[in-house]
Image (cartoon, rainbow, N blue to C red):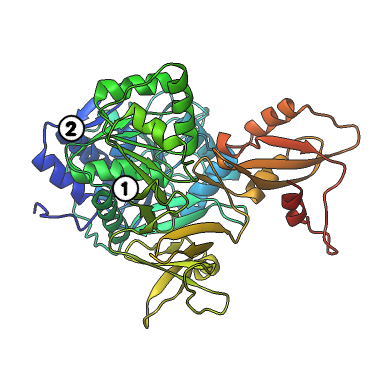
Amino acid sequence: MQPRYPRLLQDSLTISAAAHAEKTAVVTAEERVSYSELHGRALRFASLLQGAGVRRGDRVAIFLENSVDTVVGIYGALYAGAAFMVLNPQTKEDKLHYLLADSGAAAVLSEGRLARLIAGLMADPATVLPNLLALVLIGGADGVGAGATGGEPGTGGAAQDADGRATVNERFTIRGLGAWTDTTVTAPGTIPLDLAALVYTSGSTGNPKGVMLSHQNMVFAQGSLVEYLRLDASDRILNLLPLAFDYGLYQALMAVHLGATLVLERTFAFPAAIVKRVVEEGVTVFPGVPTVFATLLSLHRNAPIAMPSVRRYTNTAAHLPDEYVPGLLEMSPGALVYKMYGLTECKRVCYLEPELVLAKPLSVGRAIPGTETYLLGEDGQPVGPGVTGTLYVRGPHVMLGYWNLPAETEHMLKPGKYPGERVLCTHDWFRTDEGGFLYFMGRSDDIIKSRGEKVSPVEVENALATIPGVREAAVIGVPDELLGQAVRAYVVLDPGASYTEQAFKREAMARLESFMVPRDVRFVDDLPKTATGKVRKKSLVEQA
């Protein structure tokens, strides 16, 4: 039966494919696909997943660069009844194994070098993933390498090593999506309360935490976002942010929900090329973070940029400096500029109406439509205007919890105003003014938010500790106008060890995603310690 409105996340694609069959759904540098084709490819992937044994509630990982196939993977997993998880293509092998093992992923969609990492994990008894049923390749099932080959597409043959011996997981197969033509999908019985996605975000314990989002969470969130951003089916939404992060992910979800067009880029490494694409494709919505806009404005000062089609600029992750707004309006006269604040645990908390962006330059606005925010003091009582309190969030977008982490879930989800409800405690400090507008005051934990991504200092410290010659390392965030916070490492080396800052950063780059690599490295003789021997990070922050 054709859904009349979306109850499940994939219903948006079903509806848009019926209403806008030949309209362009996704544009990349390599291809452009219609809603009809996107829908068909998602059903093919769903059919393959079900044939491989993936069932309702299983997790499907998508380990790809930003591409049409990443979007196909998201909706194909949902059609199969599974929950999707998009993994950052920069993820290194150890962390990749952790994410797949922690989630119990039943299948992975990948290709090329990234697929060889997965196959390598499956070929090594030390990194076996017992829940993994299939590695699905975008093209054929040949050429994976890394000591693993697989059965023919659609077969149940076990993966084998280079000598033809079965790997430790005898159910694991390598399948080619390119050869799969069946679009038959058995209705899995999914309801809105079921898990739709796991979005992994850095945690203060060092290991990433899987944020559990239901269909209800995500359908509500995408609807609230398009409402306050005033978007419709005529929009052409740019996304140059990784789909592994929720800010990038929701650009795709909003586009499909509206029947709009997603202009998908892999990177912002070549900003002049992005400007050219914006003009050529008539982009109307330009999401970014302050570093992106700073780069654009720098180019604009040297040689004026004109992007007249852009009607919306959206910013989150870090404060957008007031002086950026006039420059954005020079490039795109009449555009609306949105300042926003959010957490992965509920997607978005609040936004500032663009008409107020100059009148209330320090505010992040008020709660998004259909939700409520309030502040409580240390005594658990509401605080009034001008008084700092902890921000709480009520709404259908609040996560189910953290995957397999009940204690961390209890830390974030607290009893609400009414019996039986759970609300999100952000553990961030805010104030309000007399009009109820929110002002961010600081974070109560030491998670670093840099370039729009959360960085766990413990995760970075653990990686730096594996660099030869490193005795100790401590990582903090330091204020930065463009990044929000920059990652700084204080490093104590063993006697006789020596690095230049650049050489040390190269070692770090080999172990971490690029956004986690410290921008600053300070070599010190000792780290400040407490009486119990713990690093006194407060002293480092004060020194910074």
Please identify the quadrant where the N terminus is shown.
bottom left
| Mark nearer the N terminus (2 vs 1) | 2
Which tag is nearer the camera, tag 2 or tag 1? 1
Q: Given the image, on which type of amino acid does mark 2 rest?
A: Glu
Left or right of 539 in this view: 187: left
Q: Nearer the viewer, residue 79 or 362?
A: 362
Q: Residue furthest front?
A: 359
Q: CA distance from mark 2 to mark 1?
A: 39 Å
Q: Residue furthest top?
A: 303
Left or right of 273 in this view: 23: left
On the question of residue 182 being in view, the answer is: no
The x and y percentages for residue 215 are 29, 58
Left or right of 394 in this view: 78: left
Q: Residue furthest right?
A: 495
Give the residue at mark 1: 355
Pointer 1: residues within 10 angstroms few (<14), some, or many (20+)?
A: few
Q: Please say if 112 is above or below 120.
A: above
Q: Please say if 376 is above or below 241.
A: below
Residue found at x 31% / y 62%: 194
Helix, strand or loop at mark 1: helix
Disc on res. 517: none
Please tell me in which quadrant of the rendered image residue 533 appears. Answer: bottom right
The x and y percentages for residue 150 are 40, 32
Q: Given the image, on which type of amino acid does mark 1 rest?
A: Glu
Are circles 2 and 1 on residues that touch, CB within 8 Å? no
Residue found at x 72% / y 51%: 541
On the question of residue 518 being in view, the answer is: yes
Please tell me in which quadrant of the rendered image residue 196 appears. Answer: bottom left
The x and y percentages for residue 107 are 39, 44
Give the residue at mark 2: 37
Q: Please say if 419 is above or below 164.
A: below
Helix, strand or loop at mark 2: helix
